[in-house]
Structures are given as C-alpha cells and as structure tokens.
Amino acid sequence: MWQQNPEGEFAEMVANWCGRGLSLEVAEKFAVDLTWNGALEAYLRGEVGLIDLHSASPKLAALVSGFAFAIAATLPFAATAFAPAEHLVHAVLIVTPVALTAL
C-alpha cells in the first residue's frame, strides 16, 4: 500500500492519530517520526495494532508442538504394552481420545 500511494497512506495515518486525540500538528510530526525508520512497521503498529513484529518464534512453536504430539503418541503405545490381549482394542480406543484431549 505504501509503495502505491505513500502520500495517501501518510494522510490516513495522520487522520488515524488525530482520531485518537492528537492535534493535527502533533499527529503529522508523530507520523513522520514513525515512518522514518520503516513505513510498514508504522502501519502495522498504528492501524493493525501489532506492537512487536518479532514476538513469534515459528521454530520454537514447531518444536514444542512436535514434542507435545510425541508425548501424547506414546500413551496409546503404552496402553498396548500394559493391556491384556483380550482388551487391547478397547484400551487403545479409550487411551487415544484421552491423550488427544490432553494436548
């Protein structure tokens, strides 16, 4: 958006800050200061409400998710190890939903 119409986006940002209670002069100064280091970050902070652009860690999220699924997957296998042969299917059918719910 900034690349297509930077003047319009700047005016919209100024209007946005005026709508939040700043005077026109202060809103223009504030918008200039915000866009000095990065117009995209200023847009995300001001209009979308994102504060920190680097708060998510996809690698950590994938690692924790994989670990949780691995732990939950061991429970049905443990049920097969400890359940009597005649109740094996029932044990797995009971333990599996419980393990998935625990996730």
Image (spheres, rainbow, N blue to C red):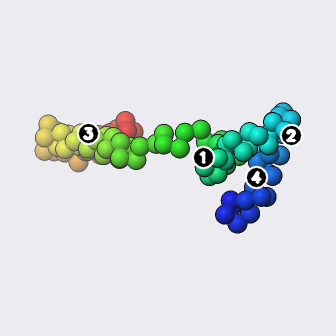
Residue wearing tag 3: 71
How crowded is the residue under tag 2: few (<14 C-alpha within 10 Å), some, or many (20+)? Answer: some
Q: Position of residue 101 (x, y in %)?
A: 39, 39
Mark 1 vs 2, N-terminal side: 2
Q: Earlier in the sequence, mark 4 or mark 3?
A: 4
* 8 in relation to 79, above or below: below
Amino acid found under the numbered disc labelled 4:
Phe
Check the picture and name the quadrant holding the C terminus.
top left
Quote the CA–CA distance across marks 4 and 3.
50 Å
Residue 50: % across, % down: 61, 42
Numbered badge on residue 24: 2
Question: Real-space Cα distance between discs 3 and 2?
Answer: 57 Å
Residues 62 and 85: in front is: 62
Q: Are marks 4 and 3 in contact (CB under 8 Å)?
A: no
Q: Residue at x 76, y 52 (%)?
A: 10
Residue 37: which disc?
A: 1
Kind of residue at badge 2: Leu
Label 4's element? helix
